[in-house]
Image (cartoon, rainbow, N blue to C red):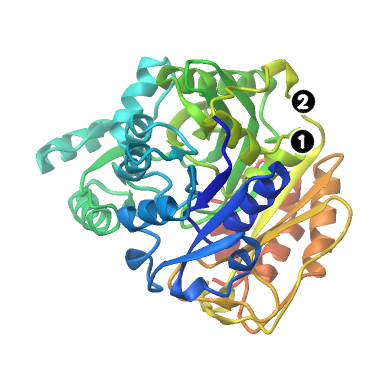
Amino acid sequence: MAIRRVFIANRGEIAVRIIRTCKQLGIETVLAVSAADRNSLPARLADRAVCVGPARSSDSYLLVNTLVHAALASGCDAVHPGYGFLSERAPFARACEQAGLVFIGPTPEQIEAVGDKLRARSEAIAADVPVVPGATVDTLQDALEAATRIGTPLLVKAVGGGGGRGMKRVDALADVAAAIELASAEAAAAFGDARVYLERYVSRGRHVELQVLGDGHGRVIHLGERDCSVQRRYQKLIEETPAVGLSASLLAQLREAGVRFAQQLHYRGAGTVEFLVDTERDCFYFLEMNSRIQVEHPVTEAVTGVDLIAEQIAIAAGEGLRLQQADVHFKGHAIECRINAEDPARDFAPSPGRVRRAAWPVAANIRVDTHIDDGAMVPPFYDSLMGKVIAYGADRAAAVALLQHALAATHIEGVATNISFHQRVLADAEFQHGGIDTGYVARLVASGATPA
């Protein structure tokens, strides 16, 4: 079917990103906005904006019935959920489909399959994809026995979680019970699911993920990997592609495993299969699958030339995969910094407020995805992401150097940002060498090289 008008159930920079591609495709856009986002840049760019409730997301962007009704009332035939909010909530996808709206994403059943980490782990095993040694937790006695068997350090992880919430590291068996209690309570508050499980902690691990596209009938291709190992408290800060310092054979195996996992699900649309690479054992483990577009998708677009939003829309419209694996070519290196409204000098505390001035870099091979311009508000109700600065170069060194120049030309006034933190990371010798692990930022902070 032809998609004529898309309802965007999201906000911020991803809303701008979706609007941009829709305009190129000649598709009209209707944007859901909360009261806090009425005058935002995406609201001004969309063909129409519909207020769906007060500022808090629980009263607006998370209301399934309200969003579906708004999409129908505004004459939309499809819904794009972006990332976050309801993008990985099966009830929302199901409600859209039941209302006759095309959901630009995977099926509700696929969202459920990967949203439950224990079920996703089972699917990975069925697809012959390696998983981190771990165990489910039913009783405290089970947990203690499993922890003894797995060994410390280990992680207590929320079954339905993500973004580091509901995740606790345990270094001693005596701390297992307390960690489970904390993780379970956090998971229940954040996801409405208190279940947790145990997993071996890989001390020198790299977070490497694979971008996939599936037609929903078992045909899947990949668009390469992204290294997202620069993290702080399990939150990604800098992402790049390709991943450097990994053997060609390991990368080939990782890519094959990611495609195999998506094929196991007959996955539809764009998704990301995330892996933990154990650099000490030279192997990798399945972590989870994100059934949506990722924040860091621009680096993949930079090295492949593929518009992932356009491919999402095409698949949702029933066109299937428009690319064969042989059509995907990788050229150069791309790296992205997430610019957040947060204060590195205050333990990266959120810094909401009005942006007096926003000067973003304009240069060849620099891309900026943002919803922030002069006078924009950064509300206290949502994620602090203000935008992303992406640099593309012939190789990694060129991309890093270009990104350094771009950040130097980025000036945000009125709210604190983490730009200085990114500049310190990019100038650091260990980062410039490449192949850092997920513990890198913690070491950098502990060394005193950057504010805690």
Instruction: Report x, y in % for residue 187.
Output: 27, 53
Instruction: Report x, y in % for residue 337.
Output: 67, 57
Vertical arrangement, residue 289 with respect to residue 238, above or below: above
Q: In this view, does 41 lie to the left or right of 11?
A: right
- At mark 2, the secondary structure is loop
Instruction: Report x, y in % for residue 243.
Output: 67, 36
Give, as a three-letter code, the residue at label 2: His
Q: Nearer the viewer, mark 2 or mark 1?
A: 1
Name the residue nearer the viewer: 143 or 65: 65
Q: Residue at x 36, y 54 (%)?
A: 69
Q: In this view, does 359 lie to the left or right of 238?
A: right
Q: Residues within 10 Å of mark 1 (few under 14, many from 20)?
A: some
Q: Is residue 348 left or right of residue 196?
A: right
Q: Is residue 163 visible?
A: no
Q: Which residue is drawn at 28% across and 52% down?
A: 191
Q: Residue at x 21, y 50 (%)?
A: 180
Whether label 2 touches label 1, CB < 8 Å: yes
Instruction: Report x, y in % for residue 17.
Output: 64, 52
Question: Reading the chain from its start, which is encountered first: label 2 or label 1?
Answer: 1
Quarter holding residue 297: top right
The residue that label 1 is drawn on is: 305
The residue that label 2 is drawn on is: 329
Separation (CA) of disc 2 from disc 1: 8 Å
Quarter holding residue 255: top right
Give, as a three-letter code, the residue at label 1: Gly
- At mark 1, the secondary structure is loop
